[in-house]
Image: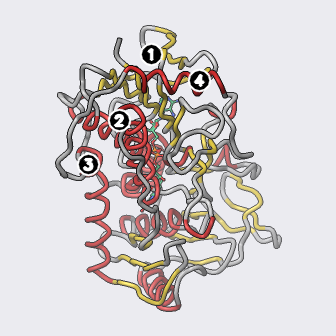
């Protein structure tokens, strides 16, 4: 019987983990199923572009994984039973249970309304494709001069505000940030942000903690009201509640706690990667939810699973940050170089060169999904029956 590996979620990290496992393990020894709710791979890092009106290249999972040894399965995951080692899914044919020997949990995250009143009813979000398409359609119907307020001064907020302002110069775009604009960046990085925001005519509301959203305005903690025909909510991401409903050890926010090999600290048959995983990075700080740090977690999980099944060496290359790549519309960008633990250093790259750099990073991220070993030669190894069984035994003893 083949060792059954189920990967939940075909975003950047799930798709990479599945593809990399298929490159490392002999096909006759493993059955790798990649479950995803949507038929396409979605370039989540481009959702602000989609919302602003650009069209993205369709990437059907069935084509991406044809002939790879990974079996894509179009279904929505509704639950995981880590004791019975099953996943509950629902698709067009109804509900079903899938049994696994090894599970890779990569369901990513969605938007985080943070319990602010009115967000669910009135705000738009761009954490996934349905939200981005809904905003796109709304923006196209606005009249010249109407105000779009982007709430959140993090990377997603900066990218969304500039993209919308560039694509819709007739609209009045504003950004509401809890702190100062780009206050974590280097002085040069901040200066460049102000220059680009000025050129695009974006109004900046600094130190504006938004406490409520209504149909035509947002309210701030200091009692102000900012007019908003459309409010775009970008204040961080929240993981889906599925993991929290399991016996897996998790954080209060629902991320799965994993060790250095991305293996659940409570259930050795389960691995978690990307936004869904709580991974400690350099400086003993948890990695932030990002494609930049999620991709190495997928490499590491796949390599660790393959090593444990075949008797190879466990991976231990450090996961670190190099830069924060921020698009500021299609013509401008900001590459902020950072320390290993993500703190800004003096060096930045700005202007058109930075825009090109960021575009190459996005293209590279999608390329990396179809080239999960980065084009390097790799050998598929035999799974030994004893090692495949060892995972289950470890579980029984745990
Ligand atoms: C607008 C925007 C810009 C960003 N820009 C950057 C950037 O420049 N750099 C960077 O590093 N990061 C960026 N990010 C963050 C980055 O996109 C995420 O951190 C990354 O996508 C996480 O990867 P993941 O594989 O964990 O999850 P995801 O990419 O979210 O993939 C999760 C997958 O699981 C599927 N799924 C979810 N629930 C279910 C279910 N119940 N059943 C079945 N399938 C399900 C989803 O459809 C999806 O395919 C950006 C995010 C946004 C929204």
Task: Tell me which label, 4 or 1, sits earlier in the chain.
Answer: 4
> In the rendering, at what x and y percent does residue 288 appear?
56, 60
All told, the count of numbered labels is: 4
| Label 2 residue SS | helix
Which secondary structure, mark 1?
A: strand
Circles 3 and 4, Cβ within 8 Å, touching? The answer is no
Which residue lies under the disc numbered 1?
91
What is the spatial separation of the Cα atoms under label 4 and label 2, in whole angstroms?
18 Å
In front: label 1 or label 3: 3
Q: Pointers 1 and 3 in contact (CB under 8 A)?
A: no
Tell me which label, 2 or 3, sits earlier in the chain.
2
Task: In this rendered view, identify the residue nearer to me: 24 or 288.
Answer: 24
Q: Are marks 4 and 1 in contact (CB under 8 Å)?
A: no
The image shows residue 311 at horizontal and vertical percentages of: 37, 36
Q: Which residue is mark 4?
A: 80
Task: Tell me which numbered mark, 4 or 2, is placed earlier along the sequence.
Answer: 2
Can residue 233 be seen here?
Answer: no
Q: Residues within 10 Å of mark 4 (few under 14, many from 20)?
A: many
N-terminal label among 1 and 3: 1
Query: Which secondary structure lies at badge 3?
Result: loop
- The image quarter containing residue 257 is top right
Q: Earlier in the sequence, mark 2 or mark 1?
A: 2
Label 3 beta carbon less than 8 Å to ligand 1: no
According to the picture, the residue beneath numbered tag 2 turns out to be 18
Is the Cβ of the residue at disc 2 closer than 8 Å to that at disc 1? no
Alpha carbon distance from label 1 to label 3: 31 Å
Mark 2 surroundings: few (<14), some (14-19) or many (≥20) residues within 10 A:
many
Q: Which residue is mark 3?
A: 373
């Amino acid at each position: 019987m083949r060792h059954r590996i189920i990967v939940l979620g075909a975003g950047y990290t799930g798709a990479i983990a599945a593809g990399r496992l298929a490159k490392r393990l002999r096909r006759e020894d493993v059955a790798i199923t990649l479950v995803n709710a949507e038929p396409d791979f979605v370039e989540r890092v481009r959702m602000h572009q989609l919302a602003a009106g650009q069209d993205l290249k369709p990437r059907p999972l069935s084509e991406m994984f044809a002939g790879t040894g990974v079996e894509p399965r179009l279904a929505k995951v509704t639950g995981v039973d880590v004791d019975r080692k099953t996943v509950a899914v629902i698709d067009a044919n109804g509900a079903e249970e899938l049994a696994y020997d090894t599970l890779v949990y990569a369901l990513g995250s969605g938007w985080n309304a943070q319990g602010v009143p009115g967000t669910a009813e009135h705000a738009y979000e761009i954490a996934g494709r349905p939200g981005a398409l809904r905003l796109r359609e709304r923006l196209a119907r606005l009249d010249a001069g109407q105000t779009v307020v982007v709430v959140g001064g993090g990377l997603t907020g900066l990218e969304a505000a500039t993209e919308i302002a560039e694509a819709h110069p007739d609209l009045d775009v504003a950004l509401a940030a809890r702190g100062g604009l780009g206050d974590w960046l280097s002085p040069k990085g901040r200066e460049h942000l102000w220059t680009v925001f000025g050129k695009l005519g974006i109004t900046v509301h600094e130190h504006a903690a938004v406490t409520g959203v209504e149909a035509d305005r947002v309210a701030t903690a200091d009692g102000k009201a900012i007019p908003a025909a459309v409010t775009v909510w970008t204040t961080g991401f929240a993981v889906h509640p599925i993991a929290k409903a399991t016996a897996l050890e998790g954080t209060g926010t629902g991320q799965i706690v994993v060790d250095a090999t991305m293996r659940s600290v409570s259930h050795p048959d389960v691995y978690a990667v990307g936004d869904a995983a709580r991974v400690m990075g350099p400086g003993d700080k948890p990695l932030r939810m990002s494609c930049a740090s999620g991709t190495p977690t997928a490499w590491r999980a796949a390599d660790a699973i393959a090593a444990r099944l075949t008797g190879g060496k466990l991976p231990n290359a450090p996961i670190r940050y190099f830069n924060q790549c921020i698009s500021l519309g299609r013509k401008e960008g900001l590459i902020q170089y950072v320390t290993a633990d993500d703190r800004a250093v003096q060096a930045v790259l700005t202007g058109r060169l930075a825009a090109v750099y960021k575009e190459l990073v996005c293209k590279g991220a999608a390329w990396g999904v179809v080239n999960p070993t980065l084009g390097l030669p790799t050998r598929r190894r035999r799974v030994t029956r004893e090692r495949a069984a060892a995972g289950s035994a470890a579980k029984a003893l745990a």
